[in-house]
Amino acid sequence: MPPTSDAGPNSNFGMVALVNTEHHTLRIELGDRAYPIHIGSGLLDKDALLSDALPSGPWLVVTNETVAPLYLPTLRKSLNGRLLAECILPDGEQHKTLETLARVYDAMAAARITRDGAVLALGGGVIGDIAGFAASTWNRGISVAQIPTTLLSQVDSSVGGKTAVNHPAGKNLIGAFHQPSVVLADLNTLATLPDRELRAGLAEVIKYGLIADVRFLEWLEAEMPRLLARDVSALAYAVEVSCATKARIVALDERESGPRALLNLGHTFGHAIEAAMGYGQWLHGEAVAAGMVLAAETSRALGWLSQADVDRVRSVLRQAELPTESPRLGADRALELMSLDKKVKAGRIRLVLMRAIGEAVVAADYDEAALRFVLTQEMGG
């Protein structure tokens, strides 16, 4: 089991490129698109981490009404008077739309953002996705810095280059792969995160243990009270191991043609819950938590997991105070929404399931009757 006091990532991953007394830096190795992930406290005050990674043209910071008063003044001061245009959007998943995206384009035009410019995404996953997608399409692609301010975005959405907005038919259906030039995860921003948002982020942290690392899952089971109490060393460890796992997988499969799909454990189910309930009613991490239970139950129905394994999945999610019961959508409605998932191929819903705790697989040839049985049991007939 990893030490409880060590904030460094699990040595199994081998992704640490630089460690110093102030912060840790991981690196995603993608050839000429490789970039650093800086993790530590007080990073918003270190202007060089951005200036060294971004082009010298005009910059636009995209943030929201909640984050702006908390951290935009610090970012402005850090950049020492550098001309920084601003686009402040409404907060919430329900605003992750083409209409909101158009506001970013308008701000980019007003600020005369050119190909040597950059976008700074200051906020959680919604801001990161919208700003990243805007950057991917403006002038056919400009630089973006991801500055995540939620646990979920620090451990997942800011890393790997997925950008998107939602469509009424489904989550993230309009998007592009566009790698950032730098990721700046300042752990200090987690101090102002609402408890519900912190718990939602823990769902993605737990995911990494379930798909790839039983030892990390054991650490989470033992140290969950410290994470919920926002112990800085525990949070640093969780963020680093999560980012290291994702960095390793993305470096192998940037565009999700193979192993990167494993990062979607619980997401096909979870996206259906989000769409059915109305975006923003269930937080993404909450829906993913319920989705991971459904994935575990489906894996048990297929004979891959034991009841004890499923109980363990439910238990660690309950420790994190996350939902383990799904809304009663009905199996037919759930399947209808799941059929819109981006991983569907040849009419088959591909699912990320578990052969064992810590060993996930992408399955398309599973028994569909087992899936319907689980959905009926967990979500209603």
Image (cartoon, rainbow, N blue to C red):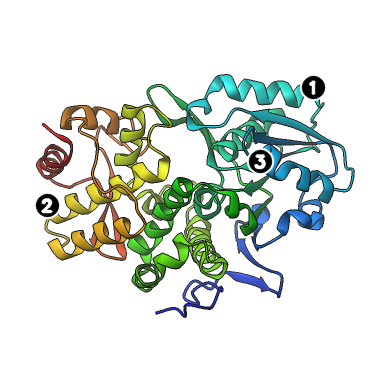
Q: In what element is the residue under mark 1?
A: helix
Q: Please report whichever mark, 1 or 2, sits nearer to the chain's N-terminal start.
A: 1
What is the crowding at mark 2: few (fewer than 14 residues within 10 Å), some, or many (at least 20)?
A: some
Measured Cα–Cα span from mark 1 to mark 2: 55 Å
Vertical side of 286 occupied by 22: above or below: below
Seen in the image, is 296 located left or right of residue 88?
A: left
Q: Please report whichever mark, 1 or 3, sits nearer to the chain's N-terminal start.
A: 1
Which residue occupies the extreme right position in the image?
A: 81
Location of mark 3 (residue): 121
- Rendering quarter of residue 90: top right
Amino acid residing under circle 1: Ala
Location of mark 2 (residue): 301
Q: Please report whichever mark, 3 or 2, sits nearer to the chain's N-terminal start.
A: 3
Amino acid residing under circle 2: Ala
Q: Position of residue 71 (x, y in %)?
A: 70, 45
Amino acid residing under circle 3: Ala
Vertical side of 77 occupied by 48: above or below: below
Seen in the image, is 181 located left or right of residue 294?
A: right
Location of mark 1 (residue): 110
Q: Position of residue 132 (x, y in %)?
A: 62, 38
